[in-house]
Image: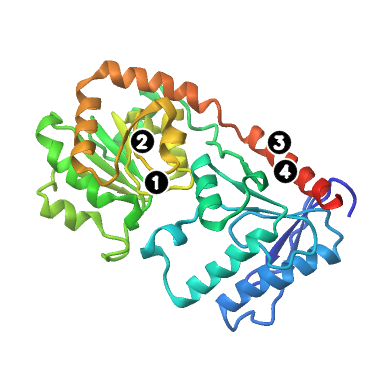
Amino acid sequence: MPPGDCTLLLPYSSGSGPPPATAGPWRMCFLRTPFDGLSEDLAKVWFEQVSFPRACARLGMDVAHVPYFAPPLWPQVPTVVTIHDLIPLILPEYRGSPWVRGYMRLVSKAAHKAALVLTDSQASARDIVRILGIPPERLRVIYLAADAIYRPLAPEEWRPICVRLGLPSRYLLYLGGFDRRKNLVGLLAAFALARERLKGISLVIAGRLPAGDSAFAPDPRPIARRLGLEDSVYYTGWVAEGDKPALYAGAEAFLFPSYYEGFGLPVLEAISCGTPVIVGGGSSLEEVAGPGGLVVPPEDVSALAEAMTRLVHEPELRQALSLKGREHARNFSWLQTARQTLAAYREAMDTSRC
């Protein structure tokens, strides 16, 4: 292909239709597999391990980028893979079925065939070295970034949105998923423990609630009822992207006590809005929050309750964390991400020529 041309290779599905015409250097190509319409799992593996590397060779690609943990075991051109996290290898409850465990063994082995491995944080890089045995010299940490809409807002900008969403005047905020590692059970227990000291401040839980209640994705509503928190917890359901900055800006603090994250984009969004954060330690979150938040052991309910209480009772601390967090957030930009990724492509190509 001519230098600078980019092709997006996608798995074919019955709903794909013909590739749309695209302007500029981008084009799209849908790849069929023998398992289309028969087995989604087999079609996925065939696309990643056979169709994709063959197409890269056939189209004369200089370098291939697999932007998630699914590199080919037999790459046909220099290949870069992004491994965002190793959740299925670190947390037992995410290892799933024998099929998932076999798939993880396959892609873990295939990662060693990549010219370079990219990841989102130093914490994930350490995990990749420790668990996969990838040499550090073949790893590149390239941070993600928040969208430009995440910025400090004046009260007249965020308050009408919060009123429209029916939010209380003062609240702590959680926004994210509901699977076990997000630690909503611990968050609610900590909020219950601190409630008497929080001066009537509510907890807002934002995001699409689980369709059912399970051990893997517990529904926070029955937990809140058991703790006697019905009058203190608000649920927004799904939140439009354009409304999220207002939710962050209106909050006293953003709570994200997750047990494990490869990056933790909501934390970066919050500090970009000037909202102090409380995060769980032990993975990438303290790295992303930087000086913009308090770090607690995610399993320590008392420590989380104490951190909530401090941020509510100490406005000077909130202000200091807000200013430091906004300054720290400036270190993350999509332009820098793009430049570093392009440099990784060039390095992968140069390495292959040696």
Marks 2 and 4: CB-CB under 8 Å? Answer: no
Lower position in the chain sequence, tag 3 or tag 4: 3
Q: Mark 4 highlights which residue?
A: 344
Q: Position of residue 291 (x, y in %)?
A: 41, 25
Q: Which residue is mark 3?
A: 339
Mark whose residue sits in front, 2 or 4? 4
Residue of label 1:
239
Element on which disc 3 rests: helix
Are the residues tagged 3 and 1 within 8 Å (C-beta)?
A: no
Q: Residues within 10 Å of mark 2 (few under 14, many from 20)?
A: many
Q: CA distance from mark 1 to mark 4?
A: 35 Å
CB of mark 1 within 8 Å of CB of mark 2?
yes
**Crowd around label 1: few <14 · some 14–19 · many ≥20 (10 Å):** some
Q: Nearer the viewer, mark 1 or mark 4?
A: 4
The image position of residue 307, as x and y in percent, is 24, 31
Residue lying at 24% horizontally and 54% vertically, measured from the top left: 220
For marks 2 and 4, give the CA distance.
36 Å
How far is the residue under mark 3 from the one under mark 1? 31 Å
